[in-house]
Image (tube, rainbow, N blue to C red):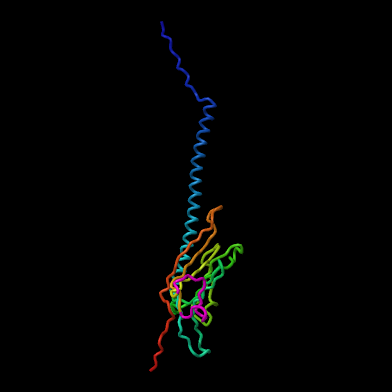
Amino acid sequence: MRARQSRPRPREAFTLIEVLIAIAILALGATLIWGGFSQTARNKSHVERDLDRHHAIAAALARMQRELSMAYVSIQVNPSPTLAAVQTAFVGTDRGRRDRVDFTSFSHQRLYRNSHESDQNELSYFLTDDPDNPSQQVLARREQNRVDDDPRRGGEVQILLRDVVAFELSYLDPVSKQWVSTWDTTQATGQPNRLPAQVKILLTVPPLRPGGREQTFGTRAKLPIGYALNFAVYRR
């Protein structure tokens, strides 16, 4: 007798439902992975934008702090009106949330060899409308690399920081030990021939994220030259 040969059992295949379920699981996994990467990329973009904004604010505050710390005034004025071409000053004006300060300092940096410049300059900080977006304000910096007879005008204006809500300054009077909102070395009723011990700087910017609150950043500048420079005139 011949032995009966057993037929191999047919291999079971996936049903259509099983295939669809497997595809759905793969699609769901891919979607979750893609969503995770996408969210990570968005978070990275938000963090980088916030860091760039904070860096710009910190740089603006640091520059104002450095330049204000080099402020000076001098009583050395040529007695002849026709030769009195140099006037130094430190004038802080209270304008609510749009303060302004004009002063002379030793903070100018010479960038070109043999240029007829010194380390003295005129500086101003103030808020003005953004030339590219009138609905926003910018913190502007004015510099004139030569001190003339009007330390509040002239020179070039550049944008120090964009999109600023408020710029507020206060000055520590070394005599009264009180913070005041104005300072003027050019008026007898102000603070002639002397500078504040410190200048407090506050910058308020819009919220970085929608629905957030305004943020205020600040610093203080110490002014080591407290009184007007008085160089003796030597005669032979």
Residue 215, percent from left and from top: 51, 58
> Is residue 172 shown above or below 25?
below
- Which picture quadrant has residue 235? bottom left
Outermost bottom residue = 236
Q: In this view of the protein, which residue sits in the foreground, 74 or 122?
A: 74
Residue 47, percent from left and from top: 48, 53
- Residue under the image location 51 percent in, 31 percent down: 22
- The N terminus, quarter of image: top left
Outermost right residue = 134
Predominant SS along the magenta part: loop
Residue 4, percent from left and from top: 43, 9
Residue segment shown in magenta: 176-193
- Residue under the image location 51 percent in, 43 percent down: 35
Whether residue 199 is visible here, answered yes or no, is: yes
Outermost left residue = 236
Q: Is residue 231 left or right of residue 32?
A: left
- Which picture quadrant has residue 212? bottom right
Q: In this view of the protein, which residue sits in the foreground, 44 or 84?
A: 84
Outermost front residue = 176
> Is residue 40 shown above or below 52?
above
Residue 139, percent from left and from top: 53, 67
Residue 189 shown in magenta: yes
Q: In this view of the protein, which residue sits in the foreground, 94 or 107?
A: 94
- Residue under the image location 61 percent in, 62 percent down: 135
- The C terminus, quarter of image: bottom left
Q: In this view of the protein, which residue sits in the foreground, 222 or 21?
A: 222
Whether residue 109 is visible here, answered yes or no, is: no
- Residue under the image location 52 percent in, 62 percent down: 204
> Is residue 117 shown above or below 40?
below
- Which picture quadrant has residue 111? bottom left
> Is residue 205 shown above or below 68?
above
